[in-house]
Image (cartoon, rainbow, N blue to C red):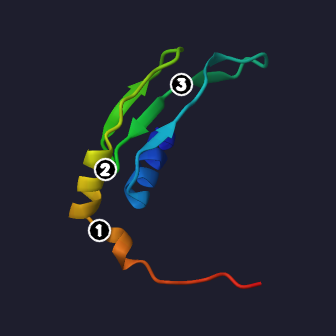
Amino acid sequence: MHWNRLLQARAIENLSYVAGVNRVGMDEKHQHYSGDSSVFSSAGEVVFTSQEPGAFVVELFAGKLKEHRANFPAYMDADEFEIKR
């Protein structure tokens, strides 16, 4: 549950798609992994999620991403800074 919330938060705060890939099943030490591989849109909406093993293809749309960024230009509020040694 926390895994998906954190992925969703990263998508929203970075105004980008976020994909989180997690393993499924039992490892050699009998640790269980539930999967919960997911893709979130820049608005935090679930684009894809699965608890099943396998390889998946998810289609993402640059136009939707650009539209969301234009309608919610939070990145323009960033302060300029530089890192000096």
Where does label 1 land, which residue? 73
Q: Quadrant of residue 27?
A: top right
Q: Can you say whether 5 is above or below 28 in the image?
A: below
- Residue 30 placement, left or right of 57: right
Query: Disc 2 and disc 1: Cα gap in Å?
Result: 11 Å
Is 45 left or right of 31, judged from the image as shown? left
Residue shown at 42%/77% (left/top)? Answer: 78
Q: Is label 2 in a helix, a strand or a loop? A: helix
| Position of residue 83 measured from the top left corner of the image (x, y, whole percent) | 66, 81
Disc 3 or disc 2, which is closer to the eye?
2
Mark 3–mark 2 Cα distance, whole angstroms, equals 26 Å
State the quadrant of the C terminus.
bottom right
Q: Which residue is mark 3?
A: 35
Which residue is pictured at 38% across the width and 41% down the height?
40
Image quadrant where residue 22 sits? top right
Residue 68, position as x, y percentages in the image: 25, 55
Q: Amino acid at mark 1?
A: Pro
Asked if labels 1 and 2 touch by Cβ distance under 8 angstroms, the answer is no
* Residue kind at label 3, given as amino acid type: Gly
Q: Residue at x 34, y 50 (%)?
A: 42
Q: Residue furthest front?
A: 63
Instruction: From the image, tell me which residue sits under label 2.
Output: 65
Q: Residue at x 55, y 32 (%)?
A: 21
